[in-house]
Amino acid sequence: MIHPSSIKFVGLDLDLTLYKESQKIKDTFRDAWCKLMESEFKISYQKAQKEFAKYRKTISGGCEIAKAMGINQPEQFAMRASINSKMYLYLKKDEKLLGLIRYLQEKYVLFLITASAKQDAFLKLEKLGLNPENDFKYSVFGDSAGSGKANGKSFAKIIKLTKHKPIEHIYIGDSDSQDIIPAKRKGFQTVMVWKKSEQADLSLPSIYDLDQWL
Ligand SMILES: [Mg+2]
């Protein structure tokens, strides 16, 4: 259960939280991933495709797939695959999301914690119709100094920036290992969107359901 009365800061993950993965995004990401495996690990594109397909079946999210594959610095690898994929080209303006963001901005201070690199994240946010400079008071990107989601560093950075108690922050994401668990470990309240989580304080069928709780 979340405690909305203590919340001052609302944090959002970007990838697979602010948008859902279309087939086009899936395909373009897989292609970039396999090309990166090909060049990094000196394996054939076909072998990379086979490997990716094997993990993709049960795991969603680049960081988690890279981790499951045993790739060194999985967040870095997923970040590079996302940049190379240019998946932002396939995102489009989401009026419903913009309405939710405007609503949240009236009541809370918003922050962003993403594993995507700053430039890549800006392109994605802009395609969704958001203003990355102004819509979030604080942002931590995958290539920000001293960042890291699974290890909790990005969450610690936010607390340093807001100078408020962890419990006054709520973080919304789509992944237990990248979002919910590390945020919870730092003392944030947590919401899983698009699916159920045993770990999160609240699970919602979509991000658009947030306004019923906050
Ligand atoms: Mg995500």
Image: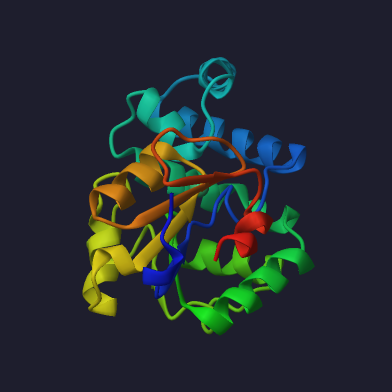
Q: Is residue 31 left or right of residue 170?
A: right
Q: Quadrant of residue 105?
A: bottom right
Q: Quadrant of residue 7?
A: bottom left
Give the answer, above or below, for where 144 lies relative to 184. Answer: below
45 or 131, which is in the foreground? Answer: 131
Residue 94 in view of the camera: no
Q: Is residue 212 left or right of residue 176?
A: right
How many numbered discs, if any?
Answer: 0
The residue depicted at 63 percent of the width and 64 percent of the height is 211
Q: Is residue 106 left or right of residue 71?
A: right
Give the answer, above or below, for where 150 lies relative to 96. Answer: above
- Where in the figure is residue 27, as x and y percent of width and height? 70, 35
Q: Quadrant of residue 159?
A: bottom left
The residue depicted at 37 percent of the width and 38 percent of the height is 177
**In the rendered view, how is the structure colored?**
rainbow
The residue depicted at 38 percent of the width and 57 percent of the height is 142
37 or 56, which is in the foreground? Answer: 56
The residue depicted at 36 percent of the width and 66 percent of the height is 169
- Where in the figure is residue 144, as x and y percent of width and height? 32, 65
12 or 14, which is in the foreground? Answer: 12
Give the answer, above or below, for where 138 lies relative to 167. Answer: below
- Where in the figure is residue 179, as x and y percent of width and height? 40, 47
- Where in the figure is residue 13, as x and y percent of width and height? 48, 56
Residue 8 in view of the camera: yes
Q: Is residue 122 left or right of residue 113?
A: right
Quarter of the image with the C terminus in it: bottom right
